[in-house]
């Protein structure tokens, strides 16, 4: 009954033919909503949000009543957003002021945010499950701004999220040094904020103490979601907590519970809330076209045309279209571009600075150029970091209206999307489950930007299921070898398990090195056996420094490929021989543009497809290969095998090889050490190379931006406008510190 009445009221509020509702209606609705709020019914909060969304329709005579209802709903942040909301009674004013942050300037917490913060005040740690529009990240800023904790570690799953956090927290640089690379050392003079992925936490050698630990998207601890990186996150928490016993804050969406007993053991409170200041409206497009949607032939064309016609009606609102893979992202973005060319003719955006950069550094024929001209962006894990961050910036400033994206958008990249379109029902090759669907849906609307967000379902949503997070290092069922090997004997639940006995059989010295490397235990043990058994025959293949020859690289990467790839890990279309050739050629040429052309010519010789299609495929493939394999996988593998060959060489009293320089160079585009931090700031390599000769080698990476600003290097005439903009974005933040004459560690 409540649902029907709620839908009726919202329908009337939304009706474009109704300019305003009368006083009697408004008063009746207010009484109804007040009773729902008193019972803590979600329908009441939903109506309040829609009243705010249609405030101009509320009669002035009843606006004070509604303002009081908004206040008792706990929607205090919206008093900042809407200047027409003025509280008249003293108790309400006092309650509002109780929600004012003590540390953030003129920031009010909503009711549930304050309840979550109060858990810290009780001396407990917080494990928070709340919707995307809850404002979970604002609590991170409150923790930082309180200045209670000297050393804060923030673990996030992606570099894009970390960069977003860095930009938000830069304003606290007078009190905290912000560290984003494992080569940076902490400040002794002020506090430190370590913005790291879990892998970087495990690699970092300079933690002296950690007072507070934050894990964003903490569901990635789970060992049951096929995330190959879950072991890294488990190991990072286990290591930091056991060594420093910091207070902690876990945050994530749509989680119904965690491993039983975990909260009690770690003095934490699991707090789940569905409270949201944004109403997600569901529009089931698939119901309007039952039996007409499909993945092949005419049904496929029909579904795409329905999408494009819908997007055309939403061209004044920011819209994200969820796609199952990078290939689908590019296919649909290009097809929609061609659709718009036929409908509206001339493009809108011909002067976006990114377009010129692409023409000069990738190809004039990359489809992304036409996409951008028609206000269309793409977003996936294969694109270079600076391109994805620019596309998000253009989208949030409404220079782009649409983004076709993969699951990268689920993992917390904040956008101002009014609409989300759930177009594909797969993530990679697997069907989307309810958890991922909920996270996609939650991206519709944004607190303090939209009151209402829309989710357009082109597929039936998955069946609702409760999602309980298993924490493998604690629960140990299941637990990967890479996590089990990290645990002290006192924390092992089943010391009689075959898994534990096999790990314990490893010689102590082997176990310590394998443990430090954090990757496949079984694979590393096999590599050690191979190196020891064949040492005399293969010594010349492992004893190299700086750059390997082709045979040396083939041998080392073959060891990694054969023994460090875990079960279920996706490698296609990559294979071992191709990887060796690509890595070797990239080390020799150090030129991604050449890699793209080489790949294009190879495809052209072996394929009769349209040349433009082949070129765009080559661009996608090379970007994905460089980002995933050359800059992530291969450097990690080289570091692992480097440590193993060092052990075996010492056992045989032979000179060790040293792969560290080569691994570091691959990971950082062969840039000089002190310049690599600019990559973290989202500055393209093309720009860094143009500044390289003007930045002395002895300038520390902590002071690179200061040096660029002091010497006006950002005005270098060789820089494209896009490159200048990317540098200037960082310098604008730096000037906040300059204005107080406090340039120093940043």
Image: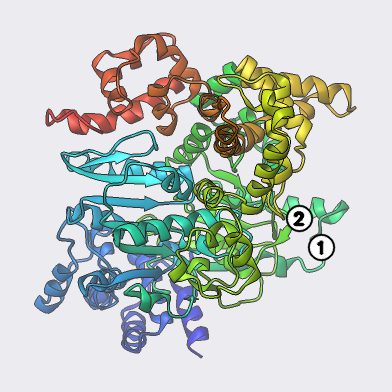
Residue 49 sits in which quadrant? bottom left
* Residue appearing at x 44%, y 29% in the figure: 679
Q: CA distance from mark 2 to mark 1?
A: 7 Å
On the image, the x and y values in percent for residue 722 come to 46, 23
Frontmost residue, 671 versus 10: 671
**Residue 624, above or below 94:** above
On the image, the x and y values in percent for residue 289 come to 76, 65
On the image, the x and y values in percent for residue 282 come to 57, 68
Does residue 676 appear to the left or right of 610 in the view shown? left
Disc 2 marks which residue?
303
- Residue 183: in sight, yes or no? yes
Q: What secondary structure is found at the residue carrying circle 2?
A: helix
How was the colour assigned to the protein in this rendering? Answer: rainbow
On the image, the x and y values in percent for residue 529 come to 69, 44
Q: What secondary structure is found at the residue carrying circle 1?
A: loop
Q: How many marks?
A: 2
How packed mark 1 is, by other alpha carbons closer than 10 Å (few <14, some 14-19, many 20 or more), is some
How packed mark 2 is, by other alpha carbons closer than 10 Å (few <14, some 14-19, many 20 or more), is some
Frontmost residue, 693 versus 282: 693
- Residue extending furthest left? 90
Quarter of the picture containing the C terminus is top left
* Residue appearing at x 17%, y 53% in the figure: 147
**Residue 204, above or below 157:** above
Q: Earlier in the sequence, mark 2 or mark 1?
A: 1
Residue 427 sits in which quadrant? bottom right
Disc 1 marks which residue?
292
Q: Are marks 2 and 1 in contact (CB under 8 Å)?
A: yes
Does residue 108 appear to the left or right of 325 in the view shown? left
- Residue 138: in sight, yes or no? no
């Amino acid at each position: 009954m409540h649902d029907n009445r709620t839908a009726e009221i919202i329908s009337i509020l939304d009706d474009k033919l109704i300019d305003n509702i009368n006083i009697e209606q408004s008063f009746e609705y207010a009484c109804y909503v007040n009773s729902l709020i008193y019972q803590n019914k979600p329908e009441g909060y939903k109506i309040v949000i829609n009243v705010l969304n249609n405030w101009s329709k509320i009669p002035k005579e009843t606006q004070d009543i509604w303002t009081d209802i908004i206040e008792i709903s706990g929607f205090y942040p919206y008093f900042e957003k809407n200047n027409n909301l003025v509280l008249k009674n003293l108790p309400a004013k006092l309650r509002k002021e109780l929600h004012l942050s003590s540390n953030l300037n003129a920031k009010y917490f909503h009711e549930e945010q304050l309840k979550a913060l109060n858990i810290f005040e009780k001396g407990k740690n917080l494990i928070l499950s709340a919707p995307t529009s809850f404002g979970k990240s604002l609590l991170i800023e409150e923790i930082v701004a309180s200045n209670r904790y000297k050393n804060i570690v923030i673990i996030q799953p992606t570099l894009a999220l970390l960069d977003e956090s860095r930009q938000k927290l830069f304003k606290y640089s007078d009190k905290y040094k912000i560290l984003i690379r494992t080569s940076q050392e902490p400040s002794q003079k002020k506090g430190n904020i370590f913005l790291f992925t879990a892998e970087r936490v495990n690699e970092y050698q300079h933690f002296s103490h950690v007072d507070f630990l934050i894990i964003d998207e903490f569901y990635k601890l789970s060992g049951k979601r096929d995330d190959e990186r879950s072991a890294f996150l488990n190991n990072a928490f286990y290591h930091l907590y056991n060594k420093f016993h910091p207070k902690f804050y876990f945050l994530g969406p749509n989680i119904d519970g965690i491993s039983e007993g975990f909260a009690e053991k770690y003095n934490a409170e699991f707090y789940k809330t569905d409270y949201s200041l944004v109403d997600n409206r569901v529009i089931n497009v698939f119901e309007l076209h039952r039996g007409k949607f499909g993945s092949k032939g005419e049904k496929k064309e029909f579904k795409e045309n329905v999408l494009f016609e819908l997007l055309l009606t939403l061209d004044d609102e920011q819209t994200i279209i969820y796609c199952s893979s990078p290939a689908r992202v590019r296919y649909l973005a290009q097809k929609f571009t061609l659709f718009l060319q036929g409908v509206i003719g001339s493009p809108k955006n011909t002067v976006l600075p990114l377009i010129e950069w692409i023409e000069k550094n990738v190809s004039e024929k990359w489809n992304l150029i036409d996409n951008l001209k028609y206000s269309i962006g793409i977003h996936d894990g294969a694109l270079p970091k600076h391109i994805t961050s620019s596309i998000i910036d253009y989208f949030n400033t409404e220079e782009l209206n649409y983004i076709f994206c993969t699951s990268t958008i689920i993992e917390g990249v904040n956008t101002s999307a009014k609409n989300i379109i759930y177009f594909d029902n797969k993530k990679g090759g697997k069907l989307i489950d309810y958890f991922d669907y909920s996270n996609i849906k939650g991206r519709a609307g944004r607190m303090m930007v939209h009151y209402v967000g829309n989710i357009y379902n082109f597929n039936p949503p998955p069946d609702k299921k409760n999602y309980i997070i298993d924490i493998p290092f604690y629960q140990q069922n299941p637990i990967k070898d890479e996590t089990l090997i990290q645990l002290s004997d006192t924390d092992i639940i089943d010391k009689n398990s075959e898994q534990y006995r096999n790990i314990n059989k490893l010689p102590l010295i082997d176990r310590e090195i394998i443990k430090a490397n954090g990757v496949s235990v079984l694979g590393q043990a096999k590599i050690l056996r191979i190196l020891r058994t064949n040492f005399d025959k293969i010594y010349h293949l492992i004893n190299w420094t700086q750059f390997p020859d082709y045979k040396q690289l083939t041998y080392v990467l073959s060891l990694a490929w054969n023994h460090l790839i875990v079960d279920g890990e996706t490698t296609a279309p990559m294979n071992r021989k191709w990887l060796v050739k690509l890595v070797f050629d990239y080390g020799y040429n150090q030129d991604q543009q050449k890699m793209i052309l080489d790949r294009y010519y190879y495809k052209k010789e072996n394929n009769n497809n349209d040349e433009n299609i082949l070129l765009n495929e080559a661009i996608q493939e090379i970007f994905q290969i460089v980002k995933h394999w050359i800059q992530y996988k291969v450097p990690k593998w080289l570091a692992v095998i480097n440590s193993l060959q060092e052990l075996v060489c010492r056992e045989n009293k032979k000179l060790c090889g040293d792969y560290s320089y080569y691994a570091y160079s691959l990971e950082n585009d062969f840039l000089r050490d002190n310049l690599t931090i600019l990559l973290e700031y989202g500055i393209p390599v093309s720009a860094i190379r143009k500044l390289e000769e003007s930045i002395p080698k002895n300038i520390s990476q902590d002071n690179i931006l200061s040096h660029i600003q002091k010497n006006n290097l950002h005005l270098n005439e060789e820089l494209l406008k896009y490159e200048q903009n990317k540098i200037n974005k960082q310098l604008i933040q730096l000037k906040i510190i300059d204005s107080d004459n406090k340039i120093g560690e940043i």
